[in-house]
Amino acid sequence: MRYVSDMTIERPNTVAGLVAKRDELVKLRDRLEADIRAITVDVDHLEAAIRIFDPENTPEARKRYAAMHRAPKGQSMRFVLASLRTADRPLTSREIALAWCQDRGLDAKDSTVVTITKRIGATLRALMEKGLVAQDGHVEGLVGWRIA
């Protein structure tokens, strides 16, 4: 080993190895970023094709749908509580969402049911925090809910 100064030891192999590894990782990062850009373009093309065949099954359409069918304040809580009170077994958020669609005369397409299920799930969690409902096992792989 050669001493460059009193306290520093020159290690050319270590530095060269680190520089080579950094260069390798920079190249890998650049390739991955290019792949991400290509995948993003592919996703955009697929979404455009989906819009052609099913205009209601896009993220934008679901957001518009959610805004158009917003329930008045307290209505979803009343509906959920009424559904659970009249049920003879625990209900899932999806079952309540399907009942909501039927009650409102909404087309129960998958995209609609997913949106409504998320809303019902949020309502159930809020009711659980208030101590009004409780989880009760699982039904069809989903959490069952009942009146507390």
Image: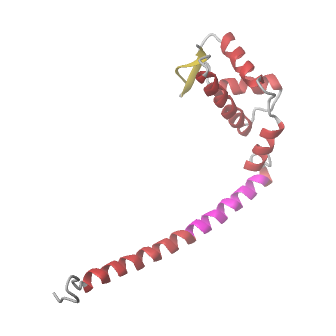
Q: Position of residue 93 (x, y in %)?
A: 64, 26
Q: Position of residue 62 (x, y in %)?
A: 75, 43
Q: Position of residue 69 (x, y in %)?
A: 81, 34
- Name the quarter where the N terminus is drawn: bottom left
Front residue of 111/15: it is 15
- Residue 140 in view (yes/no): no
Question: Does 109 sit left or right of 144 as displayed?
Answer: right
Front residue of 20/52: it is 20
Q: Residue at x 42, y 73 (%)?
A: 25
Question: Does 65 sit left or right of 34 as displayed?
Answer: right
Query: In the rendered structure, which segment of residues is drawn in magenta?
Result: 35-51
- Name the quarter where the C terminus is drawn: top right
* Residue 39 part of the magenta-drawn span: yes
Which of the 4 image quadrants contains residue 45? bottom right
* Residue 48 part of the magenta-drawn span: yes
- Residue 43 in view (yes/no): yes
Q: Residue at x 70, y 61 (%)?
A: 44
Give the residue furthest to the front.
Answer: 6
